[in-house]
Every structure is written in C-alpha cells, then in structure tokens.
Image (tube, helix red, strand yellow):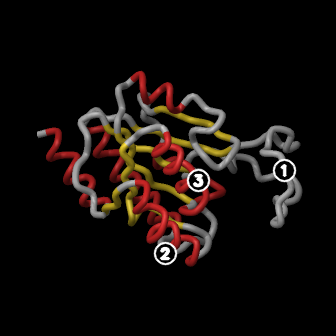
Amino acid sequence: MPVTTIDTTTALVLIDLQNLVVGLPTTPYAGSEVVARAVELADAFHHHGAPVVLVRLTARADGSDAAPGRTEIPRPPGPLPAGWDDIVDDLTGHPGDIIVTKRTWSAFYGTDLDLRLRRRGVTQLVLAGIATSIGVESTARAAYEHGYNVTLVADAIADRDAETHRHSMERIFPLLGESGSTAEIIGLLAKTRA
C-alpha cells in the first residue's frame, strides 16, 4: 500500500548507517545511495522539527556482549576495524538527534527506543537503512508490535541479498505498514506541517 499520510508526531529511524555496513556491497541500492537519501530525509525532518533517530549496531571487541546462540552462518572472525560502528559522517552533527545503540537486529530489543519515542508522543515511524531483511525488518516488526504506524522508505533501504530484499519489500512490509519513496515521504511531511 502506498504511503497515505505522515502523522504530526512522526520520527525518522535510520538503521545501521555506519561505516562498516554502508561499505558492504548491497542491492538494489549502494550504501552511498541509501545514505544520500537518508540525508535528504533527515534534513527534511530536522527542518520540520521532527525527531531523527540514528541506530547503530556495536559489540565489544571480545564479542562478550554479542547476541548468544549458534547459527549456521558464523560470525566474522577476529576483531573488526576501528570505527566500524561509527555512524557515517554525513548523518552526524545534529545535537537533537536520538542515538540508539543496539547489540541485536532490532532497534527496540534491549534499548530504550520505545520509551524515548513515547515521551515525545511519537505515533509513526519512518524507517530506512541497511539491511532490509535484518535490522530494518526486525525494527519494523517490533514497531508494529509496539503499536506504531510504520512507513518504509522503499528507495532508502538495501540488503546484501536481492532475494531477501524482495521478500521483505513484497511479502513482509505490506503486512506491517506502508511504503513510499523519499520524495513522497518528504512531500507528505511538508504537507502535514503546512
């Protein structure tokens, strides 16, 4: 379903737009394209005084606070490069932004994101970031379960795998909310603030 409205109390939530993640090969958009659209969205939200949330994934160097459990795909061996978990420079420097640090896929699990949004009266989340089928989908599911109106920015979301991206976009996201382009969402944001 195309995006129909932007609530007057909407927050932009940008998932895992950090140095390591943005540098990975992604589809259907490169990390740099996702970041460029995220900057457009953040600028529009800042202009209208709406909250911007920057979500970053991190873990201790020894992995002691990483999510436990056995998986079929092993975690990367060895330490990650310094600054791997820093939010990309293009999105930093706005003192009013909410920074959420997570250690699992979802921006809600084990964080105070819901509390910080509720205190601001937020009723809708506009989500963008990398990766579609992991951080973005997990956060969208949790947002839906927490009772938020969910909007996905279709041209500001990318994944490492084309099939998982397609599955999330076509099968999962329509069950959780609405989707629209960066331009459509910025247009609706301006319209609801006029």
Determine if residue 137 is in view.
yes
Distance between mark 2 and mark 1 Cα atoms: 30 Å
Judge depth for marks 3 and 2 and give the one in front.
3
Judge depth for marks 2 and 1 and give the one in front.
1
112 up-or-down from 22: above or below:
above
Image spot of residue 115 (x, y percent): 50, 25
- Answer whether labels 3 and 2 touch (C-beta < 8 Å): no
Judge depth for marks 3 and 1 and give the one in front.
1
- The answer to which of marks 2 and 1 sits earlier in the sequence is 2
Q: Is residue 125 left or right of residue 108?
A: left
At 62% from the left edge and 37% from the top edge, which residue is drawn? Answer: 101
Q: Amino acid at mark 2?
A: Pro
- The mark found on residue 135 in the picture is 3
Image spot of residue 2 (x, y percent): 27, 63
Q: Amino acid at mark 1?
A: Gly
149 up-or-down from 74: above or below:
above
- The mark found on residue 28 in the picture is 2
Label 1, on which residue? 69
At 53% from the left edge and 32% from the top edge, which residue is drawn? Answer: 113
Q: Amino acid at mark 3?
A: Gly
The quarter of the picture where residue 192 lies is top left
What kind of element bears circle 2? loop
Q: Quadrant of the C terminus?
A: top left
Q: Nearer the viewer, residue 177 or 91?
A: 177
